[in-house]
Amino acid sequence: MQAEIDRIQLETAQLNLEEARESNAERKARKEANARKNRQRQDQLAADVAVRKQQAKRCKHRQGGSPVDPFNGKGATSLNVAKMPDGFTLLIMCGVCRLRKFSPHPRDQGTKPRPGESAQQAKDRVEKYLADKAEFDILLDQAKDTLTPEAAQFMDCGTVIQTINPDTGAQTFRPRPCDSYA
């Protein structure tokens, strides 16, 4: 009788082991499928960003393009400038190519190395700031070429949220959400 009980317990243990192996295999397959989907999504997002960059490079940011080639307009500018609530950020938007360009962050123009940053990295950061600022200024000048003076004004929400350093009383420039995404 004990042998019969041992045989049944062994058979039950084998079935439980087989079930656990199948469950683990299903979980691994699900995890791998999710990882593959996420990689495909990231690749698609990167491709979309690349296409938008190409469109922005090709676009003249002018109204009056044809349906076949909307990026080759010859009319007034299609750029709009919006002033963000932080008081120092400007956003330039193109209605044709969907360009979204934020003004470079003023903190990046400082030549002093930040904590954990080498002198070369600080120099590269300042050079990138100057290049971004020059590109932004060109777009800003182009945005002023409108048909009416009202259209040349910045869109402004009217609310300014400033952070003040309590020790010095000067405005501090906090990191913006647009500084962390493409």
Image (spheres, rainbow, N blue to C red):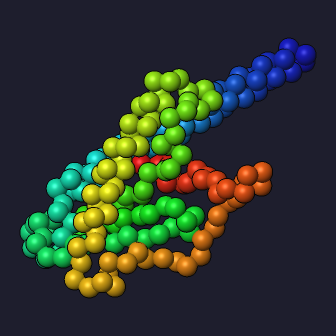
Where residue 165 appears, as percent x and y from the top left, is 72, 54
Where residue 141 appears, as percent x and y from the top left, is 28, 64
Image quarter (top left, top right, bottom left or bottom right) of the N terminus: top right
Can residue 175 be seen here? The reply is yes
Where residue 47 appears, as percent x and y from the top left, is 30, 47
Does residue 19 appear left or right of residue 12 in this picture? left
Residue in view at x 34 percent, y 55 percent: 136
Question: Which of the 4 image quarters holds residue 163?
Answer: bottom right
Residue in view at x 49 percent, y 38 percent: 35
Where residue 37 appears, as percent x and y from the top left, is 44, 44
Does residue 25 appear left or right of residue 7 in this picture? left
Residue in view at x 21 percent, y 66 percent: 61
Residue sitting nearer the eye, 111 or 54: 111
Q: Is residue 143 above or below residue 181?
A: below
Can residue 25 be seen here? The reply is no
Question: Which of the 4 image quarters holds residue 15?
Answer: top right
Residue in view at x 47 percent, y 69 percent: 83
Q: Count every numbered label the image shows and give the total.
A: 0
Q: Is residue 124 above or below residue 75?
A: above
